[in-house]
Amino acid sequence: MYIPPHFKITDDSIAYDIINEHGFATLFSQHNGVPAATHLPLLLNKEKNCLYGHFARPNPQWKEIESQTVLAIFHGPHCYISPSWYETNKAVPTWNYITVHVYGEIELVDDEDEVMESLQELVLKYESPDSSYKLEDVDSSYLTGMSKGIQAFKLQITKLEGKAKLSQNHSTHRQERVIENLEQSAHSEEKMIASWMKRNL
């Protein structure tokens, strides 16, 4: 990923936060000699330096994925930045965004306990704390049957890149004008970018 120095996320803990907050990723690899991509939730395990996930078993992407380096992209908030917000008309539009790229190697996981543990963690992350749904309450035979329809994996992280393009190449005054306009938006993406920009002022 092209990252000018002033846009580079140098603190891994910030990159981990982005992964945790925006866990629905795009996983790229090569399949039959051409690029392949699957959109799926990935769960970070910082202690093991890996990501857990699973493919639908009919998805052919997993079948030759162990022998290559793969790329998972986590898309954070992003939005259009209008030059009408600047103090001059000598300007052009741009796009502010946050993203994390994770490179690594895939290990397919077939151990039933490890598969169930990763699925349980995924459900706990996304279910509301007061939800009545509990994975352990699901009929075990039904769950076993459903689990045969997936191929679990873990992605051992070898490289982590983070980019936060938040108008850092503009003056503080101009950044403040952008933040002010973004905060007036009714859209959550714009508000999130404004919040990130305020953290970086």
Image: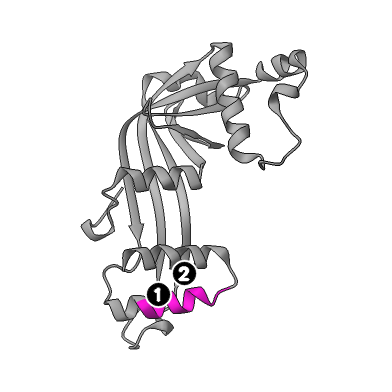
Asked if marks 2 and 1 touch (Cβ < 8 Å), the reply is yes
In the picture of the structure, the residue carrying the numbered disc 1 is 93
Amino acid, disc 2: Tyr
Instruction: Classify mark 1: residues with Cα within 10 Å, few (<14), some (14-19) or many (20+).
Output: few
* 174 vs 44: above or below: below
Q: Residue at x 28, y 47 (%)?
A: 11
- Residue 119 visible in the picture: yes
Instruction: Residue 91: give x, y in percent of width and height.
Output: 33, 81
Instruction: Classify mark 2: residues with Cα within 10 Å, few (<14), some (14-19) or many (20+).
Output: few
- Asked which secondary structure carries label 2, the reply is strand
Quadrant of the image occupied by residue 50 = top left
Instruction: Residue 46: give x, y in percent of width and height.
Output: 39, 32
Is-magenta flag for residue 181? yes
Please give left or right for residue 170 compared with residue 38 in the image: left
- Asked which secondary structure carries label 1, the reply is loop
Range shown magenta: 176-185
C-alpha distance separating marks 2 and 1: 7 Å
Instruction: Residue 88: give x, y in percent of width and height.
Output: 33, 88
Mark sitting on residue 80: 2
